[in-house]
Structures are given as structure tokens and as C-alpha cells.
Image: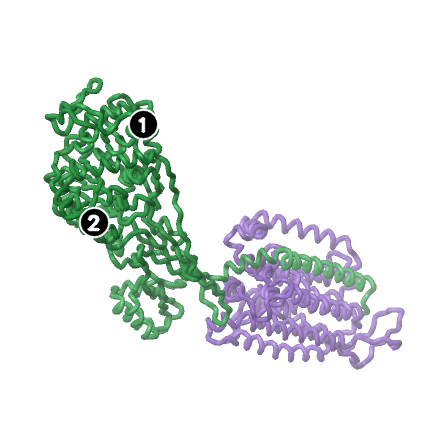
Chain colours: A purple, B green
Amino acid sequence: MAKRRPIPVRGNRKKKKRITEKPMYFDYQFLFLVLFLVALGLVMVYSTSSYTADLKTGSPYYYLLRQGIFAVIGIGVMLGAALFDYHKWKKLSLVMMVIAIILLGMVIVVGKAVNGSSRWIALGPISFQPSELAKIAIILFTAHMATIKAARIGNIKILIKVALFPMIATALIAVENLSTAIICAAVVFMIVFVTSPKIKQFVLLGIGVVALMGIFLLVASYRMQRIKVWLAPEQYEDGYQTMQALYAIGSGGIFGKGLGQSIQKLGFIPESHNDMIFSVVCEELGLFGAVCVIALFALLIWRCVIIAMSAPDLYGALIVVGVITHVSVQVLVNIAVVTNSIPPTGVPLPFISYGGTALLGLLFEMGLVLSVARRIKIPKEY
Amino acid sequence: MMTKTFTRKKIFVCSIILFVVFILLITRLSYLMIVRSDYYYEKANALHQRERSIKAKRGVIYDRNGVELAGNKPVCSISVIHSQITDEASVVAVLSDVLDIPEDKVREKVEANTIREKIKSNVEKETADIIRDKNLDGVMVDEDYKRYYPYDTLASKVLGFTGSDNQGIVGLEVSYDDILSGKPGSILTLTDANGIEIKNEAEGRIEPIPGNDLYTTIDINIQKYAEQAAQKVYKSKQAKRVSVILMNPQNGEIYAMVNVPEYNLNEPYKLNYKKTTKMTDKEMQDALNMMWRNFCINDTYEPGSTFKTVTAAAALEENVVKVDDTFNCPGFRVVEDRKIRCARTTGHGTETFRQGIMNSCNPVFIDVGARVGVDRMYKNFEKLGLFEKTGIDLPGEANSIMHKKENVGAVELATISFGQSFQITPMQLLRAISAIVNGGKLITPHFAMCSVNNITQEKKMFEFKESPGTIRKETSDTMKELLEAVVAEGGGSKGQVPGYRIGGKTATSEKLPRGNRKYISSFMGFAPANNPQIVGIIMIDEPVGTYYGGTIAAPVMAEIYENILPYLGIEADYSEEKIKETMSGIYIEEGD
């Protein structure tokens, strides 16, 4: 492990694929997909929030402006991260991990209550969600640790060592926000899974987690109630939001009502610019538009998979794996919740749902992916 | 350190799994958005659409000459929409001032955070215009129609009135509700979750279809005159009530139906008399129901002597008696173990059947009834429609209460023969009498003449059942002649109208339970006697003082006829000398 070098030299592999000293490649296709998703997100945030924003704040642009500012900053951050050598995150990720754990601990103690759960920390005028920082720290840190211990990660003890700090952070997140914790756990799991040559222990772990989840559900009766609401949302008052989302999705039909024409966003779906935004996408743009959005995510993820598989080194690949896991789990869970395919839980749709810190974090992660992509060595015969 | 092959494989396999899940989600979406689309679309629409209904203009009720009896008055309803109010204080001030409602009550409604709060409905147009002119945000003035009865009390128990939703509550307003009510239209608007209408959203508007107008057989002049006459006797005899029916016996068209005291149709929930004690809600409702009752059709009574017409017709129809058959009246008749008295306790002595009718002699009718027998009597009752409702086009018609045929012994038959021990409605009696005097045609009494569509002007005549041949023409002719004699020379002499041939029969029936000295005095009369164009009945319920039908009821009918016969175009066909002759008729105190 040549920690000091900006560009890691290859390990003792037989093939003599040299990595060029200067980054050669910039993945414009990936950049385009990201920018397109951000733009679509702004359009949808405006569409969903303008009516309620006008009623509440007197300006229909209230949410759009805030999101737009974050998007602009985020794009800057993304480009910065893309140009920044990702190997430099190795050391920084240690610091980030520590800060994240401290902040997560603070949030539990002094968190500012927003929407019932305290996930925010107020830093002067800026509210800050430490779990967003934690996600990034977890990706970078886990990737770093896994890279260091890659050779011996088959050993359970080593595996636990690799995952220890990220799992502490995840546990802290789980106190307030189970769905984010699940995403973080998935990120950690995927990174160590692809690093490790073994499969069986992960399958066993998977089964164990599912069993634990089952017990978890059975023990807490209010969670069972959630399952009941999920199975028959029309019969429960708690199923209101789900039903409203389904009304929106169903009434969209194949081609939708047209952009801006949603009725469900007019207060029927609570905070339709947040987690439930996809249902308004369905209502306004129809099945056609919804499939297009899913296809955009699929393309983005596929692009990440390609980058991960052709990454110049394991660390780069693992960072990208972490990012893919984060984005794809969030997309899957969000769409599954909105379509009532799984019990309801609050996960925003990446890039599209309203949320400044989340967008900022995501764009930073995209910057990481771009940074990894830049160092891909294009084979000579290409 | 280069990425190992198994790492790449794992990444690849995981991404494939991921895409499979994506496809599953797309499948789920397709199911929701194609298969379930209509279901959710409709549910969502039901949630978004608010329907504001537009009242349809209710059809007008006219009399036979086209005079409006029940019309519509434009009124307004004032409501407020909390979320649209900008200047709450002035809204409260203006509304409470103009509408004369206490400020706190208005404020309560103005502050209510509901979709729409109605402040007052049925506001006069002029008042509403004042509010409209103030141009207050959040105050809605909606045009509306209110049922209006220009003659207040005229034919109140026939016309009936409507409720707040323009639906008929009693009377013709109920029986012809389908024709009159039309179809309400609606404005469909899209609203947000708070029920606020979304501007610029296309409104679906379904125009209301106005109701059809109804032309009735009522003649406002006849109705008015009959009401006046009834009112007069109601006052002078301090009666409980006075009812009059005037009908064309040839086709069943009712010219007038009076039930004094009438009530004000524009204020149907206000009693037409002073309340003596404080009433509970239930008592009040009972009192109102009583006030709305149409005694001509909703209640039965013992007809008494007017029913002798039917007995006589049955006897003639069955050929068991001839006009000149002689009977003997000692002042009573013993039937089985009962001694049934005649009104004239000293007896009429020997008399013909004709004289028996003129004298309204009970023993004569007991004998005649016995000759007819139960079977034939009931057969004729049935032919004359006494076992069935008349089919009049008013709601809540009562039916007769008769002895079961197998329970009719000699005593019952005797009492039935002179109109006691059973109950029928005045309308049933008048219908039977109509058949007797019109040549045997059983008609359906009715008010509806035709309906006119307000848009197409299409006219639809109403048809009512007529069954001819219930009794023979000869029987009918004989009956007309006998009943004319009752008025010309017998107990109905006060029913005479100078210059006209009037047929009729009086009755004084003691109300049950007997012995309370409460009577219903009535008179049935028709004119011209040889070719009846009008038949009428007047009933004075519980008159104070003289209670003989021939004395108090017959003159009222005579007074009505005196005025309306010329009005109906029926010419006096007696010369002046003849008039003097007829006016010298004798008066005989009649039987009960």
C-alpha cells in the first residue's frame, strides 16, 4: 500500500497495465446523467412544492430556490471532488469517521427536533444532518479499511475490525432513523462483500439479519401495526399517505396528466416534494415518465458499475461500490415504499426529493465516482 | 492494488440482481398505472371534485285558467368561505347589519375554518344585492329559487308546500313532485386538500333542467268563493272545521276543495291558531300535521243521510223498489232486538219511497235495505267504488272502514242503509254520488289537467280511469229526479238556488262516541239536476247551536251555487214564476 503516492502503483499482479500519471478520462456521460437528474429534481420540486409553498410562505419559489442553491453548490462540490485525487481521502476518512460518530452522538443528545425525529444539528442558521456526513464517511472509511485488509478479510476477526467503526456510526443513526441506518449497513455490507473472496459467511449473515428483522418486527407491536397498514392501507388511518400516493400513481395512467397538472400535490399528499415525490412524478408524467426516471437511475448505476469494474485500484472500486449501493438502495426503497410494495419508511428519492444536505452529499459522492473514473486507464488498443 | 476478478464478478452479479429488482418495480408500477389506473383515478377524482348543485327551477302550479297558484320567487343564499375572507371585521359587521343576525353568531360562522359556511338562505333579492354591492372577499351570494304561493292560504291543503331542498312535503307538491321538481344541475370544481377551489381549472357544469308546469283543474274563482262561504259558516257556527268539495261529476275534475281553517303556505310551519300552552317538539309536529291534513280525503266519517242516495240507487238498480212503493213509518223500526228511531219521532205515517227520500225517513231505508240484502248491497257498494280509494292524485288518501260482509246482520244492514256504523271519506261519497247522477260512470276525482314542459312547451294531458256502466242509466235518471225533489220539495229545500234545478241530500251525523252532541252537518248537491255539471259536498264539523244539515249546510251550498253556476256558464232555466213556485218548498226536519 503506497499511501503516499497520489497514484497507487499496482500490486504484484502479472499483467503490466500501467496507470498513466495524468488522469486521462472524464466520464461526461455520467456527468450528463447526474446533471439531468438534478435538473429533473429541481423541476419536480418546483412542481410539487409551488402550490403549498405559495400558501405557506407566500412565494411559490421558496423550496425551488433553496434546492437550487444547494444544487449549484453541490455541482461545484462534485466537480471539485472529481478533480481531487480520491486517494487523498484515505487519511481524511479516518478524521471524517470520528467527526461523524461524535456528531451522531451529539444529535441524539441535543438534536433539534424536525418532523418528530431529531436528525438535525443546528449550526447557527444552518441546520445540518450529520447522517449525510456519516454516509460519506462510512463509504470512504469502509473502502479504505477494506483495501488495507483486503488480503485477510476472509478472516471474521479482520472483517469485524474493518466494519467496526462504520457499524458504530450505523447503530447511532439507527437510534433515530432506521431507514438511513439500513442504507448505511447495506453500504458497509456491499463493500466488505465484494472485497472478501468468500460468499458463504455473507449468505449466513444475510439470513441472520433477516431473522433478526423478523424478531424485531414481532417484538415491537407498533411495527406489526405498520405491516398491517401496509397490507391494507385503505382500512387504516395511518394508511392515508400511502393511499394518497397510490391515488396519484394510479391516476397518472400511461402518459400522465402533464407536468404541473398533479392534483394530489395540492395538499393531499403531505409534503409531496419530499419522500413521496415519485408518486407525483407518476401522476404528472405517467408510467412513461416514471419508467424514464427509473431508467435514468439504472443508467447511472450501470455507469457506476462499469467504473467500479474498470477502476484503477481496489480503493477506487470500493468507493464506487459504496456509492452505487447508497444510491440504488435509496432508489429501490423509495419507489417500493411509494408503490406500497414494502411497508412504509421515509427514504428520499436521490436527486429528486427536496433536501439540501442530501443533495449536497449525493453530488459529492458523484464527484468521488467521477474522480475514480478519471483515473481509469484506457487500454492502448482502445 | 488492482481489483480482483471475484470482486468484479460480485459487483456484476449484484448489479444484475439490482436490475431485476428494478424490473420488478416497473412491473408493479405498470400494474398500478395501467390495470388499477381507473380505480385509483376515480377514487382520486371523488376526492378532488366538489359538487355544488344548482337547484332546478320548480314547475309552476296553475289553476285551470292559467292563474299561478304556486310559483317561484328569486331569493339568495349568503355564505362565507373562511379562507378567502380578507377583512373579517367588516364582513361580520356588514352581514350582521344587513341580515339582522347577532354579530357573535355571524362571527362564529366567519371564523369557522370550514369549506363553506352558510349564513342565511332565502334572503330577499334586494337584501342580497346590498351585500353583493359591498364586494366583500369571501362572501358568496348565490341565486336561488324559493317556492312562493301568491294566494297564501288558497287551497292550502290541496297544493301543499315544499321543503328547503325544493322537494314536495304534502299535497299536490308531493304527488306531482317528479313532474314539478325537474333535475338539479351541478357545478363540478376541483379543490385542493383544504377544499379550496382551484382557480383556472376547467369547471364541469351540468345545467339544471327546470321542472314542468302543472295545470290543475282548480278554478281559482270557485275555490275563492267556496273558501269565503266556508269561512263565513265556520265563523258563524263556531265550527271545528268546514270542508267543501266541488267537482265535475262527468269527468272527476275538482274545481275546488276547501278545508277551513286553511293555513298559510308561505309559512307552513306556523300554526294557524294561537298556541295556548307551550308545546313540546312532538306536540308541535302533531299540531302541524293536523293543520296540514286534508279532511276531504285523509279522514273518514259516518256519512249519515247523504248515504241514503247510495242505498236508494242500489235498491233501484236491483229492482227491489219502485218510486211509488208505499212504506209506513211509525217513528221507529224494530230490527231484531233493536228499536231504531226515525228523526221524526212521531213518524211520517204512510209514505211512498219518493216521499221517504224527501223526508229522509230512516224506517223506509231500513225496509229498502232489507229488501236489497247484504250481498246485493255490497255488490253495488263495490261498483260505486266504496271499498277502494278514489285514486285522487293527492297523497295519504284514506279508505273506507266497512263491516265485513259475513258480519253484517239485520241490525248492521239497517244502520248501513241510512249511512251509519261505517266510515268513508267525503271524496268516496262524492265519487259514488257522481256515478249515480252522471249515468253510471265511475270517475276518478283529480286535480291534474296537464303538464307543460318549460323548454319544449310540449303539453301532456293526464288521463284518469273512468269505468262506465256501474249502474243503469234509468237508475241514474230516477235518482236525479228523486234528489231534485229532495231539494225542490223535501228536506233539502234550503239548498235551492233561484232559477236552477238543484238535486241534493242533507245529512246530520252524530259523531262517535254518541251522546256528546257533536255533529257533522253536511249537504250534497248537484246542478243542473237533469244534467249535472257540478256536484258538491259541504261538511260542517261540530257546529255550535243548530246542527241540522238541511238548516246550516244546505244554504251554504246554495250560496256557492248561486254564484258559481252562472260563472260556469250554466244558464238559469226556470222562468220567474217557476222560481217563486220552487221557493215555496216545504221544510221537513230531517233524519240523522
- Viewer-proximal residue, B548 or B9? B548
Residue found 22% across the figure and 44% down from its top? B243
Q: Is residue B331 above or below residue A319?
A: above
Q: Nearer the viewer, mark 1 or mark 2?
A: 2
- Image quadrant of residue A7? bottom right
Q: Position of residue B576 (x, y in %)?
A: 14, 48
Q: Residues within 10 Å of mark 1 (few under 14, many from 20)?
A: some
- Viewer-proximal residue, B460 or B267? B460
Residue found 23% across the figure and 23% down from its top? B367
Q: CA distance from mark 1 to mark 2?
A: 35 Å
Q: Is residue B557 left or right of residue B371?
A: left
Report the amino acid beneath label 1.
Glu
Residue lying farthest to the top in this orientation: B337
Q: Which residue is mark 2?
A: B572
- Viewer-proximal residue, B17 or B456? B456
Q: How many marks?
A: 2
Q: Which residue is mark 1?
A: B318
Report the amino acid beneath label 2.
Ala
